[in-house]
Amino acid sequence: MALSGLDIYKLLPKTNCRECGFPTCLAFAMQLAKKAVVLEKCPYLSNEAKAVLEESSLAPIRLVGIGKDKKIELGNETVLFRHEEKFHHPTAIGFIIDDSLSDKEIDEKIDKINKLKFERVGQALEVNLVAVRQNSDKKRFIEVIKMISHKTSLEFVLISSDIEAQKEALALIGVSKPLIHPQGLKNITVFANLALEYKTSLVVSSPLLEEISNVTKELKKQGLEDLILDTTDKPLAKKIWDLTQIRRLALKKKDRSFGYPILAIVNEKDPYSEVIKAADYISKYASIVLLQGVESWQILSLLTLRQNIYSDPQKPLQIEPKLYPVGQANEKSPVLVTTNFSLSYYTVLGEVEASKMPSYIMSVDTEGMSVLTAWAAEKFTPDKIASSLDAFGVKDKVSHKRMIIPGYVAVMSGDLEEKSGWQVVVGPKEASGIPSFLKNLK
Ligand code: SF4
């Protein structure tokens, strides 16, 4: 729990000796509360005060990594609702591969998983994990891990309660720091030792929150803190309740035994229900979601949802304001004007590409606001557009002086013509009208 400056002051020696570089202990406490100075600057702290202050500076939900060099970072969240601040570490999306599948089925599944790469509003959307689940004997489990490790660059989750199978799997791919999921608490201390030996993370799974809390406390004493929580498979409402309770207990009640990322496995045969469940878990605090479905229509929708939830609500997604050529744009190509809000730009881009007419799109710096919002906030003004034409050297790229503005801001046409000296053509209100508009442009 973060302490206030006054709470910290109460723990300091209050001698005002100035050795920390501050005139008083209170001044030092205030800076410490703002994290503008480190604890070690005061050499006179008692061990007790040091322990309290160190504990208070820890994140309420631990940052846990999976993969070599902690390639996937999870947790370290600080709020219940994204409008309060933002969610920091996007849910890792992964796929369960049961070792009971045939080699051919596994190959086909991996091929599909490897193709799950998308681009949306200028960002790459990718999946993160493969989870090999043991249903057969140890030999088959290891065989499948070997087979998959040659065919994917995704990080691994090893789902098996068989200690010997986990040991062998870790001997094989432990260097890549897979997540160990022992599917329960049986032999949890042995699995914890394995996680410590391979410096990797461990899933603590139980249907009971109390049991999870007791075990994480014990494992912490054992020296293992890179933990992920799983409340096992439950009906949707119960699972959402668990996920919400854990987040609340960690953030609001400051209960460190729940301060870890959460994993949710979707076991649904119907592909639509599977996506709905996965979407619910992404929305409500799961740091890892594992599912069976690998169809692009399923995964694109989940990745899009994740992208939206984990963007900063106070900072719209934006692109660099500049002049973008589309296709083989030349001096005769039309110049379309829009804002640097990613969604506006990429919607216009999609329609210009669909028109197959080489063009220029001038993206004006509106601090990431969309057309109407920027216009209302006076960020998309005739002055701004005119100065962007100069700044981006548009007149050196085209031999005409004609620009197309969005239909929603037709009202600025006259003023814009005056300020820029360019002819202004009012384009369609909706981007979907761009292809036919460009085809009929004379
Ligand atoms: Fe107070 Fe410690 Fe700073 Fe001295 S060094 S003024 S005791 S905070």
Image: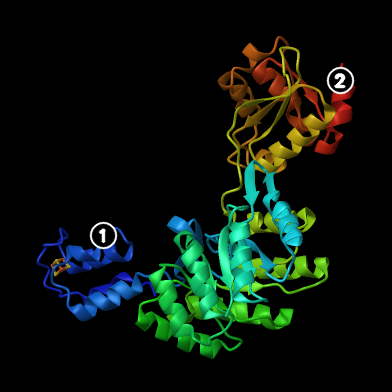
For ligand 1, the image quadrant comes to bottom left
Q: Earlier in the sequence, mark 2 or mark 1?
A: 1
Question: Left or right: 232 with respect to 108?
Answer: left
Quarter holding the C terminus? top right
Residue at 58% across / 34% down in the picture?
320
The amino acid type of the residue labelled 1 equals Val
Of 134 and 61, nearer the camera is: 134
Of 307 and 389, nearer the camera is: 307
Of 166 and 248, nearer the camera is: 166
Residue 165 position within the rendered picture, expressed as x and y whole percent measured from the top left: 55, 75
Q: Secondary structure at mark 1?
A: loop
In the rendered image, the vertical position of residue 237 relative to residue 407, given as above or below: below
Question: Left or right: 177 with respect to 365?
Answer: left
- Residue for badge 2: 441
In the rendered image, the vertical position of residue 244 relative to residue 32, given as above or below: below
> Badge 1: how crowded within 10 Å, few (<14), some, or many (20+)?
some
Residue 40 position within the rendered picture, expressed as x and y whole percent measured from the top left: 20, 65
Q: Secondary structure at mark 2?
A: loop
Residue at 59% across / 32% down in the picture?
321
> Badge 2: how crowded within 10 Å, few (<14), some, or many (20+)?
few
- Looking at the rendered structure, which numbered label has been put on residue 37? 1
The amino acid type of the residue labelled 2 equals Leu
In the rendered image, the vertical position of residue 331 relative to residue 411, given as above or below: above
- Looking at the rendered structure, which numbered label has been put on residue 405? none
Does residue 76 appear in this view? no
